[in-house]
Amino acid sequence: MGSQQMDVPNLSGTLAVVTGASDGLGLRLAGRLAQAGAEVILPVRNERKGADAVASILHETPGATVSTRRLDLSSLQSVADLAGQLLAEDRPVDVLVNNAGVMTPPRRQVTVDGFELQFATNHLGHFALVAQILPLLRKRGARVTTQSSIAANQNGIHWDDLQWERSYSTSRSYSSSKIASSLFGMELDRRSRSGAWGITSNVAHPGVAATNLLAAHPEMGRAGDGISVRLIRTLARVGVLGTAETGMLPALYAATSPRAGGGKFYGPSGFMHLRGEPAEQRPYECMADAPAAARIWAISEELSGVRFPE
């Protein structure tokens, strides 16, 4: 089986929601879901990029049912607005992929709610979204896949200063946010089983793929592509690292494969899990820490003001 020809079940009659699908991994993932017959909703921050993403998917799969909704994950009000819209539409969500993320802004940035940007976008916004659309996820026993990163195997959660107010490290703050979201993905499955919510939750990571996540983003204070992203693109071109097309496969597998289970971790099966066919792998030690997962869950409920059922 070639890596880009991964078998995807027939998803006709299902509804999938993919955050961060205006480009990169999310766009490729949303395209494959649409190709398999799912109706796909793309919650996006940038409406122009969202429209371009819809056009790209329709070009690849004429007749696909795909639409955008407005979502800025760094704003809890925007998350609540999207959740309210989806609840009003009252359609069961079969697949949710928590894919959107920001990565390593060179300077600490604060959201409208006063949270550090990466923690808010990568973790807290997704946490609040899942909590608020839980009734739609429970209706048909949704599969929820949270996109992690190999960076979640580095450093740790910055418990003493979650918002990085006293000191800021671009890479450690990113790792901390991705560990938090990974712990949430694992804890969601545990709580679903204990509370009989019927949801299956797992975590995936793309390895290292050449996407726009590390590219120049003037709005985040990164005026040009750094040495690291140029190197990643070069290595991807010669097949050492992955592309957006290959990097999205673990999340696609985790979100759709009948063989993918809850509380599991999926990534590329190649050398050092940098690229390759999607496969289950051992969760990172920090990700398998159940007490830490319960701790970040409680903190996230307090910070977001959104609570799951007991």
Image (cartoon, rainbow, N blue to C red):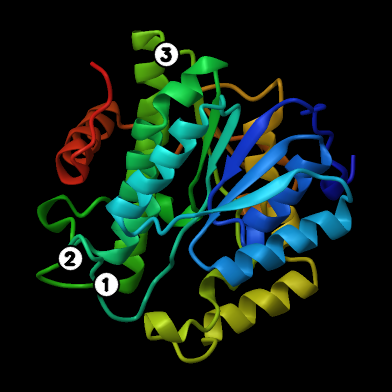
Residue at figure coordinates x 82%, y 27% from the top left: 10
Q: Earlier in the sequence, mark 2 or mark 1?
A: 2
Looking at the image, do the residues carrying marks 3 and 2 touch, with CB atoms under 8 Å apart? no
Q: Position of residue 193 (x, y in %)?
A: 41, 12
Indicate the quadrant where residue 290 lies: top left
Residue 146 vs 202, above or below: the answer is below
Between the C-alphas of marks 3 and 2, the distance is 34 Å
Q: Position of residue 11 (x, y in %)?
A: 77, 28
Q: Position of residue 247 (x, y in %)?
A: 67, 54
Q: Position of residue 64 (x, y in %)?
A: 81, 45
Disc number lying in front (3 or 1): 3
Which residue corresponds to mark 1? 169
Q: Earlier in the sequence, mark 3 or mark 1?
A: 1
Which residue corresponds to mark 3? 197
Numbered disc 2: secondary structure: loop
Residue at figure coordinates x 34%, y 10% from the top left: 195
Between the C-alphas of marks 3 and 1, the distance is 38 Å
Looking at the image, do the residues carrying marks 3 and 1 touch, with CB atoms under 8 Å apart? no
Pick whichever, 36 or 149, lies toward us. 36
Disc number lying in front (2 or 1): 2
Which residue corresponds to mark 2? 164
User: What amino acid is found at the position of numbered circle 2 in the picture?
Assistant: Trp
Residue at figure coordinates x 52%, y 74% from the top left: 214
